[in-house]
Amino acid sequence: MTDFGEVQTPTPLEGQVVLIVDNFRMGVTQPRDDTIGTSPTVPTIRFSRLQEKLSLVARMPLNWDRNFDITMNLDWALANLQSPGDELNITIDYTVAQNVLAQSGVGVTRASSQTTGAFICVVGKLQPFDTYRMAIVFDRDDTSNPTTPPDVSAIAFEIGLANLDGVDEAHFLGGCILYLRQN
């Protein structure tokens, strides 16, 4: 399994859509609002059960180059002391949304695609509140949800824990979607 804990930063040709915890909607079974730290206190959403879900529709900017894959970076903090090799596994269901202004009645109507992400706990980053970044790539040529059509304007996604093996509780901090800009 790949360790997605390395920080990735945008290059000059990349743009980003910032994903702020407060913008997410809770699923039917809600993870709980929480905080980490004392000064400052950072708002988080704490996952501890498989049924807990968060969702968001991320509107993509007009200068997004649809000829390239996009990457979603998700930032997590450990909730409990972990052992080396423990994994956090998440599932993301996503669908692309077509611009409803371009075609009347078209929106989030496609069947969702599912992808998974993981990070592996490493020595030196095993304490509660140690942070990790997970990178998820959305394939522009996904059979069900290609991002290449010009009227695709947003990505709707839902995040949840894939299993409770290894890391069974984690704080979601937020993240960003990285994309290449058109020249």
Image (cartoon, rainbow, N blue to C red):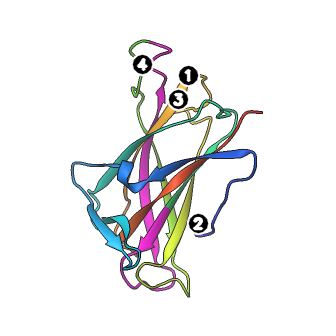
* Residue 34 versus residue 130 in the image, above or below: above
Q: Residue 58, percent across and down?
A: 47, 40
| Residues tagged 1 and 2 counted as in contact (Cβ below 8 A) | no
Between the residue at mark 3 and the residue at mark 2, the CA separation in whole angstroms equals 27 Å
Secondary structure of the residue carrying tag 1 is loop
Q: Residue 98, percent across and down?
A: 48, 24
Q: Is residue 14 magenta?
A: no
Between the residue at mark 1 and the residue at mark 4, the CA separation in whole angstroms equals 10 Å
Q: Residue at x 24, y 56 (%)?
A: 30
Give the residue number, with chain letter if any, for mark 2. 4
| Residues tagged 4 and 2 counted as in contact (Cβ below 8 A) | no
Give the residue number, with chain letter if any, for mark 1. 151
Q: Nearer the viewer, mark 4 or mark 3?
A: 3
Specify few, some or many for label 2: CA neighbours under 10 Å numbering under 14, 14-19, or 20 or more: some
Please tell me which residue lies in front, 87 or 96. 96
Q: Start and end of the magenta stretch?
A: 75-103
Give the residue number, with chain letter if any, for mark 4. 106
Q: Amino acid at mark 2?
A: Phe
Q: Residue 62, percent across and down?
A: 61, 30
* Residue 9 versus residue 64 in the image, above or below: below
| Residues tagged 1 and 4 counted as in contact (Cβ below 8 A) | yes
Secondary structure of the residue carrying tag 3 is strand
Q: Earlier in the sequence, mark 1 or mark 4?
A: 4
Q: Quadrant of the C terminus?
A: top right
Q: Is residue 96 magenta?
A: yes
Q: Amino acid at mark 4?
A: Val
Give the residue number, with chain letter if any, for mark 3. 153
Q: Earlier in the sequence, mark 3 or mark 2?
A: 2
Q: Nearer the viewer, mark 1 or mark 2?
A: 1
Residue 169 showing in the rendered view: no
Horizontal side of residue 71 vs 82, given as left or right? right
Horizontal side of residue 172 vs 125, given as left or right? left
